[in-house]
Amino acid sequence: MTETREIKLESWDRFSTPNLDIEYNLIGRSHTFSYMGATVILSLPNHERMGEGRDDGYVHEWRTVDGGENIPRKAFVFVADVCVQRGDGVALPAEVLERHPNAFDLISKDDQKTLNGLVVESSDIASNAFEYWLSIMRWKSGDYRIGRPGIPNTTQWSTYLRESGSLKRVWIGPHVIQVPASHAVTENDWETVQLALQTSTEVPIHIKFFDDAQEAFGRHEFRRSIIDLAIACEIFMRTMVLRRIPSDLDPDVRVMLEEANINQYVRKFFPNLLTEEGKKRFKGLANDHLGSLFDARNKIMHMAEGTRATGENCFRFSRAAQTLFEVGAMTA
């Protein structure tokens, strides 16, 4: 008779982590946190899985010490493993642990259905937990690129100039490879992320829109970038103001404040929260950049007019948004 035993199960998934640059000492590290009622353990590849020609990542920066020895400093990591522990247990033939997965001849149809149900539920938790982890990583490290694919549609060839009629090649331009600057996740970043995960902290919504705007800018989607930047700035100012409203304020007055035009926030509500130094910085910011940003957003959304959706303006508005977030800390 086949021996049956209660087998405690956990799920395992592997996810891609494009543009994840870490300090070398973080190789093999993990984050553990609660998510959707489960314990989630997210782990980076260990040293054995890293190296030139490996699929999981490699060291890309070293420092040279006396004697000429190269000490690894930074590494690109291409994957992360996610383990979901829910405390699930299923009574199965003990022999399944000695066989390859999916031993259909040993596992009954009902148990197969149960196992597939656990796969679906655990997979949903894993994918959502991974996206949550990425959002916290981007926020705490200040690098919007983490987990995002980067700039698409780059030519694999140099640009040729040729005579229109004969198609004879006249000139071959240099092949420019774009390597965007990256910010390696530090030990401090890693610990800050762990604290945020442990406390189930959510990324502020204005940060999410700001990161989306940065990605759109990198992809030359300038209209999308401007819209997201304007939303980020508007949400930030509205949130700052509405948080300071007394809880016993008349409900009709609260609704009036919530529905007020963003210009009211720029001219009156938000500046009233700031210190004198904050007001000075904000006045110049509003006059030189924020007004232009909101006007450009309105032209794009309401009139389909995108002449100001340029890379130069996206860069300017991005810097303005960052300054606004800094000024927001200067409250009275």
Image (cartoon, grey):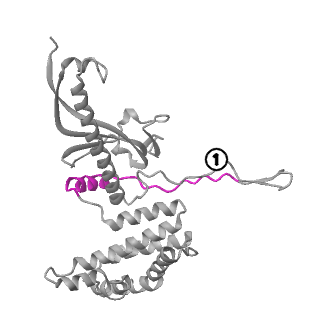
Please tell me whether mark 1 sits on a helix, a strand or a loop: loop
Amino acid type of the residue tagged 1 in the rendering: Gln
Residue 42 located left or right of residue 316: left
Specify whether 253 is left or right of 326: left
Circle 1 residue: 156
Q: Quadrant of the C terminus?
A: bottom left
Which portion, as a residue range, is magenta? 174-200
Q: Residue at x 47, y 75 (%)?
A: 297
Vertical relation: 89 (above or below) 194: above
Count of marks placed on residues? 1
Residue at the location (25% across, 17% down)?
98
Position in image of residue 109 (x %, y %): 24, 24
Q: Residue furthest top?
A: 1
Residue 178 part of the magenta-drawn span: yes
Q: Quadrant of the N terminus?
A: top left
Q: Position of residue 84 (x, y in %)?
A: 24, 40
Toward which corner of the image does residue 253 lie, by quadrant? bottom left
Quadrant position of residue 173: bottom right
